[in-house]
Image: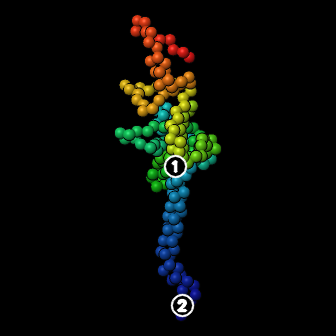
Amino acid sequence: MMSQEHIEQLIMNKTQPLSDQLVEMADELEELNRRINQMIRFGKVSEIHSSNKLIKVQHGEKRVTPFIKWFTLASGEMNTYRCPSKGELALLLDISSGASGQYLALCGWESDAFPFSISNPKQVVTEFGALKMLWDSEEGELILSAPKKIKLDTELVEGTGDISDAIRTMSEDRELYNAHTNHVNNTPPNMPK
């Protein structure tokens, strides 16, 4: 008859490979959990490369990515460039599945530092510092606001309606001009203000 110690030893010998395998699987699961936790996370843009084409993103207390690319709406024949701002939120995607920290940043998230300027679902706003473009689909208006000047670099500016400034419309100017018949030396008449 076998002793209890002998039976326990036999069981231990038979189950040891399974036990080793379970420990190995637990280690693999822990590593996979670590990788998953690193794959998608929020951070803030901490530095912009001198080329203005790469950024560093701080995520966590002290972790900072190397210079990485960020997502833009288009980069083919149709191209959109907008350099993220320092302090802007960025969603980091680890495209190496958490293995080596090869990140891509998705920017454009609202934050306390950069809140949305409107909350009207019928309007679209694009701001470039002080330059602002607002499209109001309900009113049918497109408003461009620039602090100094808007320059149109084209051969022809064409409109289907009237054009006005702070004084009057172009059609009112045309009526004033056409009402004057005393042109001297083909010079336009003095226009009232």
Q: Nearer the viewer, mark 1 or mark 2?
A: 1
Nearer to us in this view, 102 or 121? 121
With respect to residue 190, does 84 lie above or below? Answer: below
Nearer to us in this view, 78 or 51? 78
Q: Which residue is mark 1?
A: 92
What label does residue 102 carry, if any? none
With respect to residue 191, does 6 lie above or below? Answer: below
Q: Residue at x 51, y 71 (%)?
A: 22
Q: Residue at x 51, y 44 (%)?
A: 137
Mark 1 vs 2, N-terminal side: 2
What label does residue 2 carry, if any? 2
The spot of residue 167 in percent (x, y) is 56, 22
* SS at badge 2: loop
Residue found at the far right of this picture: 112
* SS at badge 1: strand
Residue found at the far bottom of this picture: 1
The amino acid type, in three-letter code, at marker 2 is Met
The spot of residue 188 in percent (x, y) is 45, 12
Q: Residue at x 48, y 34 (%)?
A: 52
The spot of residue 64 in percent (x, y) is 56, 44
* Residue 173 seen in the figure: yes
Report, in whole angstroms, how far the alpha carbon at label 1 lies from the one at label 2: 61 Å
